[in-house]
């Protein structure tokens, strides 16, 4: 049996619900191996078809979505008129609630949304797309090797015309901070700690605050081209900003905060949005 591989076929940026950590932004590179008999062209499958078929399925069904492990005992899920109402109870007793378009979440029938479980769900979706000569499809969701500081954040961009408008998608990102031309791991870890497992929200989208069982919650709401989105989560898992949370704005924001804290220094901030892309903030002269 012949084997064909494509590394870094796609990048998957999403958020998932974790029973311990809560709303968790993640980014993975997708590697694929196809096993099968050779077709009349002498191929398992043409590379262009591999990329087109697999990447299109990943983009359509999993990328920029909230992945929900529906077999988790604290998960309650209902659907009506093309929208999901989701309540997810964490081990801590805190609750996360999502209400919004069905197309913005991906449901997997497991208790935890691990890379292995998400890979299996992608495989199940892919299998009918391939001819009989393709016997096996192996997928690996590979975490970027980041030697320094990194953080996981979720957000939504209501003005975006694409899938970034979905209120609970996210990224695992590295950050590089240069102070007076020299890399500052100390400042990088400070900011990574501040934004670890966080929801970065625009203050204007804060619909209400309330308390339930002595826990402070924030309820965010906005309407975008795909519909109305609502997200409720513990206030201490939110970081409020006064702008849309694009990576360009976040890079400028971090740089501005550092410049105010250390006015005698000049800063260059490379804020990543997932793998291999991001924005640069530079101190004003």
Image (tube, rainbow, N blue to C red):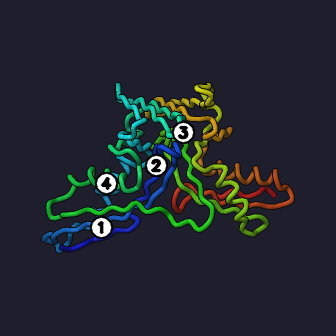
Front disc: 4 or 1? 4
- Disc 4 packing (10 Å; few <14; some 14–19; many ≥20): some
- Residue 68 vs residue 264: left or right? left
The residues tagged by marks 4 and 2 sit, at their Cα atoms, a distance apart of: 16 Å
- Give the labeled residue for mark 2: 14
Q: How many marks are shown on the rendered structure?
A: 4
- Residue 284 vs residue 244: left or right? right
Pick whichever of labels 2 and 3 is earlier in the sequence. 2
Of the 4 image quadrants, the one containing the N terminus is bottom left
Pick whichever of labels 3 and 4 is earlier in the sequence. 3
- Give the labeled residue for mark 1: 33
What residue lies at 31% left-to-right and 57% top-to-bottom? 54
What residue lies at 76% left-to-right and 60% top-to-bottom? 267
Q: In the figure, 43 relative to 201: above or below?
A: below
The answer to whether marks 1 and 2 mark residues whose Cβ atoms lie closer than 8 Å is no
The residues tagged by marks 1 and 3 sit, at their Cα atoms, a distance apart of: 39 Å
Pick whichever of labels 1 and 2 is earlier in the sequence. 2
Residue 220 picture location, percent across and down: 57, 31
The answer to whether marks 4 and 1 mark residues whose Cβ atoms lie closer than 8 Å is no
The residues tagged by marks 4 and 1 sit, at their Cα atoms, a distance apart of: 14 Å
Please give the label number shown on residue 92: 3
- Disc 1 packing (10 Å; few <14; some 14–19; many ≥20): some
The residues tagged by marks 2 and 3 sit, at their Cα atoms, a distance apart of: 23 Å
Please give the label number shown on residue 120: 4
- Disc 3 packing (10 Å; few <14; some 14–19; many ≥20): few
Residues 106 and 180: in front is 106
């Amino acid at each position: 049996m012949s084997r064909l591989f494509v590394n870094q076929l796609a990048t998957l940026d999403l958020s998932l619900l974790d029973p311990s950590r809560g709303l968790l932004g993640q980014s993975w590179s997708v590697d694929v191996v196809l096993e099968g008999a050779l077709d009349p062209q002498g191929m398992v499958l043409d590379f262009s078809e591999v990329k087109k078929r697999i990447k299109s399925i990943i983009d359509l069904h999993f990328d920029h979505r909230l992945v929900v492990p529906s077999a988790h005992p604290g998960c309650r899920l209902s659907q009506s008129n093309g929208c999901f109402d989701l309540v997810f109870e964490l081990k801590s007793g805190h609750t996360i609630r999502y209400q919004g378009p069905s197309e913005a979440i991906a449901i997997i029938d497991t208790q935890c949304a691990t890379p292995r479980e998400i890979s299996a769900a992608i495989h199940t979706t892919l299998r009918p797309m391939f001819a009989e000569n393709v016997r096996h499809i192996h997928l690996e969701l590979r975490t970027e090797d980041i030697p320094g500081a990194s953080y996981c954040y979720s957000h939504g961009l209501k003005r975006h015309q694409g899938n970034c408008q979905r209120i609970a998608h996210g990224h695992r990102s590295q950050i590089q901070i240069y102070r007076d031309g020299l890399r500052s791991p100390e400042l990088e870890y400070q900011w990574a700690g501040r934004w670890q497992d966080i929801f970065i929200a625009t203050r204007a989208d804060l619909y209400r605050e309330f308390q339930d069982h002595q826990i402070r919650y924030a309820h965010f709401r906005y309407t975008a081209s795909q519909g109305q989105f609502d997200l409720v989560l513990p206030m201490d898992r939110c970081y409020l900003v006064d702008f849309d949370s694009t990576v360009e704005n976040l890079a400028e924001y971090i740089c501005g905060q550092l410049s105010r804290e250390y006015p005698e220094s000049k800063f260059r901030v490379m804020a990543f949005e997932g793998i291999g892309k991001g924005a640069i903030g530079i101190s004003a002269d």
